[in-house]
Amino acid sequence: MPPAPIFATLDPDRAFLERAPLLVRDFVTGLFPPSLQWLAGNLLAVVVIVLFFASLFALLTLAERKILGRIQNRPGPNRTGPAGLLQPLADAVKTLVKEDIVPRAADQVLHFLAPVVLVSLALMAFAVLPYGRHLVPVELDAAVLYFFAAGAATELAVFMAGWASRNKYSLLAAMRALAQLISYELPLLLSVVPVVMLAGTLSTTGIVAAQAGWTYGVIPHWHVLTPWGAAGFLLFFVSALAESNRSPFDLPEAESELIAGHLTEYSGFKYALFFMAEYFGMTALCGMGVTLFLGGWQAPCAFLEFIPSYAWFFAKLLLLLGVFMWIRGTLPRLRIDQLTRFAWKFLVPLALINLGTAAFWQLSAGWSGPALQLARWLVALALVAGPFTLLGRRLSAGVAPRTYRYAA
Amino acid sequence: MILLLALLILVPAAAAMLRRNLVHSALLLVLSWAGLAAFYLWSGAEFVAFAQVLVYVGAVSMVVLFAVLLTRQNPDRAAPPDAAARLRAGAAVLTAAAVGAVIGHAILATPLPAAAGAPPVLTVRQLGLELMGRHAGSLLVIGALLTVALLGAVVLAAAEPGEKPGGKP
Amino acid sequence: MSPLHLCLLLSTGLFCIGLAGALSRSNAILVLLGIELMLNAANLNFIAFWRYGPAPSAGAGVVFVIFTIAVAAAEAAVGLALVIALHRHRRNLRLPEATRLKG
């Protein structure tokens, strides 16, 4: 029998805060007749997800502008409301009352459908993320597959937007965006495969459960803290940046070189919908990253378990989103050829090698004793670090390190 | 329910085959494929449904659309259907109708088991074990096939050496 | 009429649409798409028999469909590469005019 943890004063499974969302849900569904309770429960989940992530989107736009402002040594929006807090509201009003222009030559139906399809598909991805111990909107046996299927279908909406605009710049930019999305889909999926392999399940709940527990009560068993997990997380993170069209991979709508990519002919609320879908996609991918590599809703230390699990999930989610914004403020944009070369010559081989590392980790799971454990860590680290440095050297040969003559 | 799914699958498919605009055809077919995924989901084959979406809606549709755009011709050059084409279309529809009638008659004449009870339960784990166990050989063959197809597609589509990409032959 | 009958009729309809499309259209891409539809009809049958058929085995139908999807994806990739090669040689995609094997 394991020694009783010192700090655990209450069973986290039964804690009031942990169960609070469930109690609220049961109260609301209790208002409906029994035959409709099933429907009411699901509808409630949908409404809560849409409302919550829509408001998170509003806050994220504000936070992004503030953070970028600070990074670039300017105050950011600070006129609307106290400290600019009402800026998202003002933006919403602006986009709602703006004229919605549809080019005469455009394919009217597809031009209208593209943003709708994009936002609904982006929202669908939220259905399978485990937000907390008891908070999974839909329990699916193949949840990870569902998530990436929904993500893959968004590419179609990008194409529809570019093609329906009947504008050659839109079309070219859409093709570029598609080339990028397809290229980075591969490392994204390949970096997820080791997690699925080691957890032995495609269900998000199962993957979170596989990361439960702590060593000595302080070191969590998250995947990111293993050699293959760290490499996988980095690959996943970079691919997620590219999949959600974020800087430094924001070529599809690079404001300064292509007018606005496939969004050129969109205005008013439809443009806002595209913007929203981008943030939804980013949030969903971050949520998936948290679930797959950062332990989901698990607390980092045993004695911090009294904080409810959903708070941990959203803390990690916000942390990842913050890193996304930080990167946007820091790194310059890639060129399209650098972008595709980076995906195919660097990320994909590394992801494949990482698969081998994970297989080794799985096979050596039975090794016990400090010497063998050390050997296991060393071999795995070498498998991760060796190809990384070699490939990095080869790829940047003749290009890096660059010296900037006028840089201070 | 199944009639609704049938509508969702058949109507876009038929419309896709009738449209003159290739991009519309492709997008309608994507709708039909999504309907098929819904059918799989309804039958309880969750994994296949998501695989269908991932492969068809996500990948095959993209390949088709890229091919359509890369081989685009002037819309005004597309000749209206001539007599030969109309004859061919008529013959094709007749053939298909005949085939359909024969198969449909055969289906209706066959006594099939009435409605089964609950759908067979198949977890992803069972499926994986089956793939890796009984069908491991086939899985290897499929892997080899996909690799060969990938290489073949690249070789076929790559510009020949000496030819300028996009240049007139 | 049992649900299995309905599923089989649905798949027959899909197959016939694919067949008519593949036979009647002269554009290479549409012919390929018609063939894809016929493959999909076959998949539909596998799933229908797996779901309603006599004594369904644990996963035979599903495994079959997964293999078919993989083969169909490979077929689409190679077929469309052929379409692009055809377009490069002849500047159009009209199959009745593509009668020569040598480019």
Image (tube, rainbow, N blue to C red):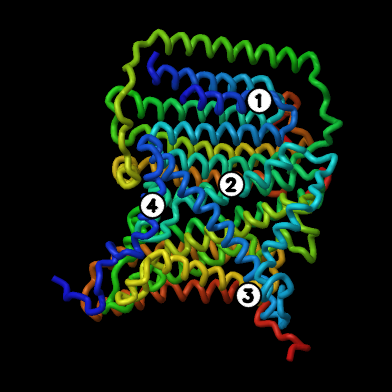
Of badges 3 and 4, the one in the foreground is 4
Under mark 3, the amino acid is Ser
- Establish if A349 lies above or below A380: above
Let me know if residue A33 appears in the view: yes
* Residue A151 in picture, x, y percent from top left: 55, 51
Distance from Cα at disc 2 to Cα at disc 1: 24 Å
Which label belongs to residue A120? 2
Let me know if residue A252 appears in the view: no
Residue named by callout 3? A396
The residue carrying pointer 3 sits among few (fewer than 14), some (14 to 19) or many (20 or more) residues within 10 Å by Cα, namely: few
Residue named by callout 4? A202
Q: Residue at x 46, y 47 (%)?
A: A44
- Establish if A37 lies above or below A221: above
Q: Which circle's residue, 4 or 2, is located before the other in the chain?
A: 2
Q: Say which element carries label 4.
A: loop
Q: Which circle's residue, 2 or 3, is located before the other in the chain?
A: 2
The residue carrying pointer 1 sits among few (fewer than 14), some (14 to 19) or many (20 or more) residues within 10 Å by Cα, namely: some
